[in-house]
Image (tube, grey):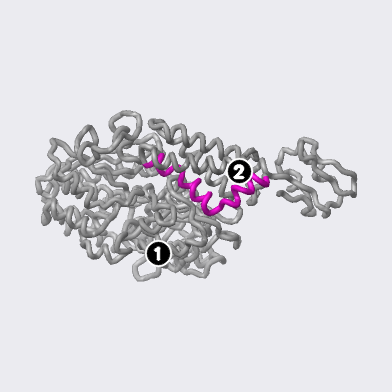
């Protein structure tokens, strides 16, 4: 398309087409939905509607709708009627929905959110999961077809880029981002406008904007969901950032394990080039900007900006000393700005609506919203976006509706392997950058893993440290060697061979690694261990002193025992694979602990509940 594109007219045209096309049937086709079986649901809806020649009905994919608990999700939107949300769909249910609802006009109530006996809601928006949310980053996710640029434009897409290029100077763009108080959502929380201002004055024949989509925290899927549900928001922000600092080239560095995100990015880039919002002389402004994709191999350390740069350059992903910072000497030695997906997804809305609009959400030092991936032992798993300053208690109990089965909440891990465990005593802490650091954790990229009474905190610390050891690039000794020694100590503790002296060694090593490692990966690697030692030291002591795992998780410290409830039916004896159980018929049996392999077959076979694990 030519550079003199009338974006407003195109927006109005696309909006009229979206609103005037009659009924829209949206199928959540992010990775979570696809994994739950959404693809055959989409295909069934499309084929059945075509077969029955149902008029004024468009069936299309959308991104993450948010409630992973209810996937696959289908939403029917009709002008003048309440939206209908169908949950836990399959092809058989889809055929019935087509026949009875789309053709017959009767909502299939038992398949809707209202038909779920566990909730009285009539639609997803009625759930407590959505009550405290404010969607800025996720404003288009679950609403538009991410593979159709026209639907993005209908929702004011590329208006911010047009405004920046036609009515703002680069300095004004940077100042607006500064005034908004937007801080990096990738974990560090560095002011975005300040970062851009560092790169802008540096003279070079080439500058770069990089989108860090290397999301690697266990349990985190915020960036993936944005790329899958609203890829143009990231591309538009990269172009705005490029204009602000004088860059004409951008790269999206995304892990290869995100094939859906990569494919939708490719589609979005192609469509943006065809429309003329990427490429040469955008909007006739004389500004050139284009974007390419670079795939990462899934190394956690490449989330650190200098390691990421090395990877794009074709080198092994390893951090380097700073300064020089990337804003002065980054990709191929040129000035470079790196922002993560969520940070960039805020930019267009700030430019369109203004800094003060953005600052009305969140707190003074942490304006705006934060996207979290809520998972673990929680009733409402999914993707949520809440204003900064909302408390952890509100997220866990109001949005997440607590732990399944009425079990007791124990802790929540924020910040992934770089964060720490937060306990009940700190649940009223506001969620913002400074508040979480003050209680020994961190915001991180937004993974939030909830644990209940059945989790062993020593085992949790070991899990995160094992991940960090595996992901260390190996460049600096404290991280490479120190984390391995910490893991060896934790291995001894969970296997029943730990000592109380090991706890002091563990703490000393953690503090040393924290203060001497080269990059953020090593500096934060000990956090899960330090936070669990602080809040759950009694569990560590039970492991080393009593040789007991209070949560009943660490297998080496468990034993199966037969109580007086035993009727002597011999079922346990017959299923034991190693002959560890002895006893006569109609008499209480016993288990030889030296032979027992702790498989649990006896407990499962006992009809009287006479075998306990402790």
Please state the horizontal and vertical placement of residue 507, each as a whole percent of the image: 50, 43
Does the residue at mark 2 contact the one at mark 1 (Cβ under 8 Å)?
Answer: no
Residue stretch rendered in magenta on the structure = 520-546
Residue 545 lies within the magenta run: yes
Numbered label attached to residue 214: none
- Main secondary structure found in the magenta portion: helix
Q: Residues within 10 Å of mark 2 (few under 14, many from 20)?
A: some
Q: Picture coordinates of residue 179 (x, y %)?
A: 21, 59
Residue drawn where x is 28% and y is 66% of the image: 360
Q: Secondary structure at mark 1?
A: loop
Between 45 and 346, which is closer to the camera in this rendering? 346
In the displayed structure image, the side of residue 467 where residue 587 appears, left or right: right
Is residue 306 or residue 548 the one in the foreground? 548
Q: Dot 2 corresponds to which residue?
A: 500
Q: Is residue 304 left or right of residue 14?
A: right
Quadrant of the rendered image containing residue 183: bottom left
Q: Is residue 146 visible?
A: no
The residue drawn where x is 83% and y is 44% is: 590
> What is the secondary structure assignment of the residue under circle 2?
helix
Q: Which mark is residue 390?
A: 1
Give x and y (percent) for residue 380: 50, 59
Image spot of residue 284 (x, y percent): 10, 48
Mark 2 vs 1, N-terminal side: 1
Vertical placement of residue 9 versus 212, above or below: below
Whether residue 253 is visible to the viewer of this picture, yes or no, is yes
* Gap between marks 2 and 1 measured at Cα: 39 Å
Q: Nearer the viewer, residue 603 or 71?
A: 603
Residue placed at 52% from the left, 41% from the top? 506
Instruction: Kindly indicate the quadrant of the structure image that contains residue 369.
Output: bottom left
Label count reads 2
């Amino acid at each position: 398309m030519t550079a003199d594109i009338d974006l407003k007219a195109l927006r109005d045209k696309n909006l009229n087409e979206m609103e005037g096309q009659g009924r829209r049937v949206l199928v959540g086709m992010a990775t979570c939905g696809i994994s739950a079986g959404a693809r055959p649901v989409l295909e069934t809806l499309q084929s059945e509607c075509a077969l029955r020649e149902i008029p004024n009905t468009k069936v299309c994919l959308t991104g993450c709708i948010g409630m992973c608990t209810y996937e696959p999700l289908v939403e029917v939107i009709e002008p003048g009627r309440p939206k209908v949300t169908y949950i836990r769909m399959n092809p058989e249910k889809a055929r019935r929905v087509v026949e009875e609802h789309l053709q017959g006009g009767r909502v299939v109530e038992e398949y809707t959110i209202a038909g779920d006996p566990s909730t009285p809601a009539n639609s997803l928006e009625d759930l407590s999961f959505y009550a405290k949310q404010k969607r800025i980053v996720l404003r288009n996710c679950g609403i538009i077809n991410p593979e159709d640029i026209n639907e993005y434009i209908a929702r004011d897409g590329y208006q911010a880029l047009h405004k920046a290029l036609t009515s703002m100077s680069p300095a004004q763009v940077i100042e607006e981002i500064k005034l908004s108080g937007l801080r990096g959502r990738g974990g560090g929380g560095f002011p975005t406008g300040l970062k851009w201002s560092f790169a802008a004055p540096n003279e070079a024949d080439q500058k770069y904007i990089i989108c860090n989509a290397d999301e690697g925290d266990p349990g985190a899927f915020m960036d993936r969901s944005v790329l899958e549900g609203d890829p143009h928001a990231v591309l538009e922000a990269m172009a705005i950032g490029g204009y602000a600092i004088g860059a004409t080239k951008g790269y999206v560095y995304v892990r290869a394990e995100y094939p859906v995100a990569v494919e939708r990015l490719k589609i979005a880039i192609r469509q943006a080039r065809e429309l003329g919002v990427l490429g040469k002389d955008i909007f006739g402004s004389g500004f050139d900007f284009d974007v390419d994709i670079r795939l990462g191999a899934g190394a956690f350390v490449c989330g650190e900006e200098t390691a990421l740069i090395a990877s794009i350059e074709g080198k092994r992903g390893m951090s380097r000393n700073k300064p020089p910072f990337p804003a002065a000497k980054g990709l191929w030695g040129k000035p470079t700005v790196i922002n993560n997906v969520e940070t960039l997804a805020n930019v267009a809305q700030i430019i369109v609506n203004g800094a003060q609009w953005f600052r009305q959400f969140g707190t003074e030092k942490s304006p705006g919203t934060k996207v979290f991936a809520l998972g673990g032992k929680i009733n409402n798993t999914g993707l949520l976006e809440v204003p900064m300053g909302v408390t952890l208690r509100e997220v866990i109990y109001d949005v997440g509706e607590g732990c399944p089965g009425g079990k007791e909440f124990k802790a929540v891990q924020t910040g992934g392997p770089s964060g720490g465990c937060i306990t009940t005593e700190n649940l009223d802490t506001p969620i913002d950058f400074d508040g979480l650091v003050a209680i020994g954790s961190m915001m991180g990229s937004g993974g939030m893993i909830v644990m209940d009474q059945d989790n062993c905190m020593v085992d949790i610390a070991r899990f995160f440290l094992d991940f960090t050891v595996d992901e260390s690039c190996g460049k600096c000794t404290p991280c490479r060697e120190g984390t391995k020694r910490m893991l060896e100590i934790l291995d001894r503790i969970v296997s029943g061979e730990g000592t109380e002296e090991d706890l002091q060694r563990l703490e000393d090593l953690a503090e040393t690694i924290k203060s001497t490692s080269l990059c953020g990966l090593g500096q934060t690697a000990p956090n899960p261990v330090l936070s669990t030692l602080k809040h759950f030291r009694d569990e560590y002591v039970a492991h080393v002193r009593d040789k007991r795992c209070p949560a009943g998780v660490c297998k080496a410290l468990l034993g199966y025992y037969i109580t007086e409830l035993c009727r002597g039916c011999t079922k346990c004896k017959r299923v034991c694979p190693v002959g560890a159980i002895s006893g006569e018929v109609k008499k209480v049996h016993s288990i030889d602990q030296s032979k027992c392999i702790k498989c649990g077959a006896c407990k499962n076979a006992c009809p009287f509940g006479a075998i306990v694990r402790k």
